[in-house]
Image (tube, grey):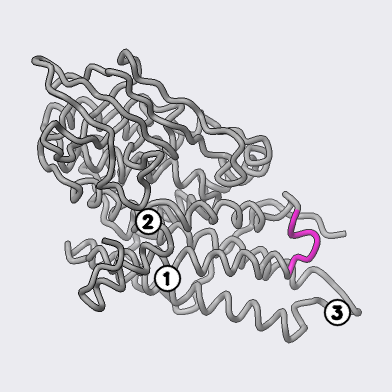
Amino acid sequence: MITASKDQFESPDFYALDGLLTEEHKLIRQSVRDFVKKEISPNIEEWAQNAHFPYEIVKKFGDVGAFGPTIPETYGGGGLDYISYGLIMQEIERGDSGMRSTASVQGSLVMYPIYKFGNEAQRNKYLPKLASGEWLGCFGLTEPDHGSNPSGMVTNFKDAGDHYVLNGAKMWISNSPKADVAVVWAKSEEGRIHGLIVERGMEGFSTPETHGKWSLRASTTGELVFDNVKVPKENLLEGKSGLGAPMMCLDSARFGIAWGAIGAAMDCYDSARRYSLERHQFGKPIGSFQLTQKKLSEMLTEITKSQLLNYRLGQLFNEGKATTAQISMAKRNAVEVALNIAREARQIHGGMGITGEYPMMRHMANLESVVTYEGTHDIHLLILGKEITGIPAFE
């Protein structure tokens, strides 16, 4: 009987990608890898099995610099480049996709729009507390009847003199049940989409939790409900309006997902590689069989291709040249690769692969959410199709 050992993860780097990283990149990656091994790996199976969101992890994420790593240090962020951000998301999702969702929502979908579209007063009020983990944030775009078509949103706000009155609902919102602030996208009386910062405690604002998930069970998910919520006018994000504003946030988040999903794939591959050398059948390790070697070889190939794709995308992000279509390609590729690797790794583990002693089933279930959120697999394919042909298939 094989017993799962403690977290002994070794990152595959078949094309010596580390040679392209700076010493700072490596130090950041190591610090987050150590954090995951200490704070997440020993507990994640229990959290997932019990559908428990460990709220105490929020402050710990702040301490390790996982929130808003690309936000300037002036506002509590890390002042790091996008490759650093990608490496942080990769390491956290190697631990668990739900944990990475908590971190990437905070950084890319809450802190980023406040920094990018907010004014100095808003930046100073919200960003340091979000960066430290004192406050948790969420991002309200998806609605019950408007997922892939966010422009159809019905959530709206009206001018009431010294404040706005916000009405509507959002769903499938990561972090919402515990969030202190929400960046909410709603239509003005003119039908223009704007971002508003809504704070917990505002009358008429509630965050019902979503129960019964088979995926992202260690992450907290819920709704945002607005019943004549009075939002101060100073909470409007004035820097940009229109659907392009939340889409810019999603570009940043999808970049993190592309790196993160490969982290999950690496974890599955590493577990399968170890197991194939330890598990004996027919008098020898199953790693000696051709079909097992085929599976492992294909896993490593796809991980390596994805690492190179993500690294180049990181360079483009750093140069301000990354396009939405390029980001869509990386997100779509990474999640598909990770799902396939999780399934193949589960087969190498045989019956043991369905237990909580090994991570594949948890990663597999989590990735079924990742393949859908922040742009479904098919929508990203059609974004690429539009880029190729110039013809939008979803309008």
**Magenta span dominant secondary structure:** helix
Horizontal arrangement in the rendering, residue 371 relative to residue 271 (left or right)? left
- Quick one: label 1, few (<14), some, or many (20+) residues within 10 Å? many
Note whether 19 is above or below 88 in the view shown. Answer: below
Label 3, label 1: how many angstroms apart (C-alpha)? 32 Å
Span of residues in magenta = 348-354
**What residue is drawn where x is 27% and y is 45%?**
152
- Quick one: label 2, few (<14), some, or many (20+) residues within 10 Å? many
Amino acid at circle 2: Gly
Q: Is residue 289 magenta?
A: no
Element assignment for label 1: helix
Element assignment for label 2: loop
Q: Which residue is mark 3?
A: 284
Amino acid at circle 1: Gln
Q: Which residue is mark 2?
A: 375
Image depth: mark 1 or mark 2 in front = 2
Labels 1 and 2 touching (C-beta < 8 A): no
